[in-house]
Amino acid sequence: MSTPPTRQVTVTALESFPTITAGDDLTHAITTTLNIQNLTLADDDILVVASKVVSLSEHRAVDLDTVTPTARAHELSQATGKPPEIIQVILDESVDYHLATPTGPIIARHRLGYELTSAGVDRDRTTRQAWLLPTNPDASARALRDTLTAATGVRLAVIVADSDGRPDRHGSTVIALGAAGIHPLRTTEHAGKTHHETLTDLAAGAAGITLGQRGRGAPVTVLRGLHYHHSDAGIGSVLHHGQQR
């Protein structure tokens, strides 16, 4: 089934978004910011939410003082300059990894099936903590979609997104880790050929232009105008390795 073409999309960051701490109610934070911004959601809007605030709300922290680095973690620490405790957390979250260059970054296949820089582990530089990915990003997206729909009365889609480096170049982009209400693939047909695109990654990348990075304080963006098919298949349905439900 072909996806209707999209001709125009608006991308709006929710600012000023409250600082999210462990256990905070994301739905309340989002609806409060929408009211302050005088922004009303409409059917088929897509909310792209940074995975960091989802992890915060789900208490996905590791106390680095409780981590005992292995010999391999110390070796990789010397090569990359990262603390051995962080390296060990990355190894614990991974099923496979390699160094993009002799000094990093570490490109890891996360045990959920994603291939990510540092297995998606985010070091908190103000504390002795590291933040892991949500336990199940698709389930997190579904839960957030359901509570937001209940709170707003409109049909929405939610994408949980994360910034990620590229192994072949400097800099980072934004990719989708979890999704609800939007099919992860877009199917186009032309001249007898069918092409499948990862629509959720395209949406996450568009949102990444306005999503806050490094403490900017805008972890949620609203996309409006994107044509898509409704589905709860999730990102797990398109991963080559691993499944999540």
Image: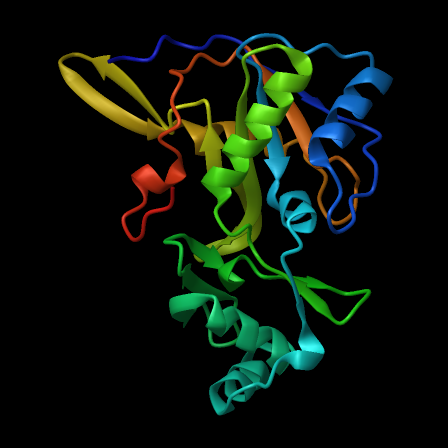
Q: Quadrant of the N terminus?
A: top left
Quadrant in the rendering for residue 185: top left
Residue 165 in sight: yes
Location of residue 237 in the rendering, given as x and y in whole percent from the top left corner: 31, 38
User: Horizontally, is 5 left or right of 211 in the view?
Assistant: left
Q: Which residue is more in the foreground, 169 or 107?
A: 107
Location of residue 151 in the rendering, given as x and y in whole percent from the top left corner: 68, 18
User: Horizontally, is 91 left or right of 183 in the view?
Assistant: right
Q: Is residue 113 above or below residue 35?
A: below
Q: Quadrant of the C terminus?
A: top left
Q: Is residue 168 above or below residue 181?
A: below
- Residue projecting furthest to the left: 192
Residue drawn 52% across the image and 83% down it: 73
Q: Is residue 49 above or below residue 110?
A: above
Location of residue 49 in the rendering, given as x and y in whole percent from the top left corner: 62, 35
Residue drawn 31% across the image and 39% down it: 238
What is the basis of the colouring in this image?
Answer: rainbow
In this rendering, the count of numbered labels is: 0
Residue drawn 32% across the image and 45% down it: 239
User: Horizontally, is 221 left or right of 100 in the view?
Assistant: right
Residue drawn 61% across the image and 73% down it: 86
Q: Which residue is more in the foreground, 100 or 23?
A: 23
Residue 177 in sight: no
Quadrant in the rendering for residue 19: top right
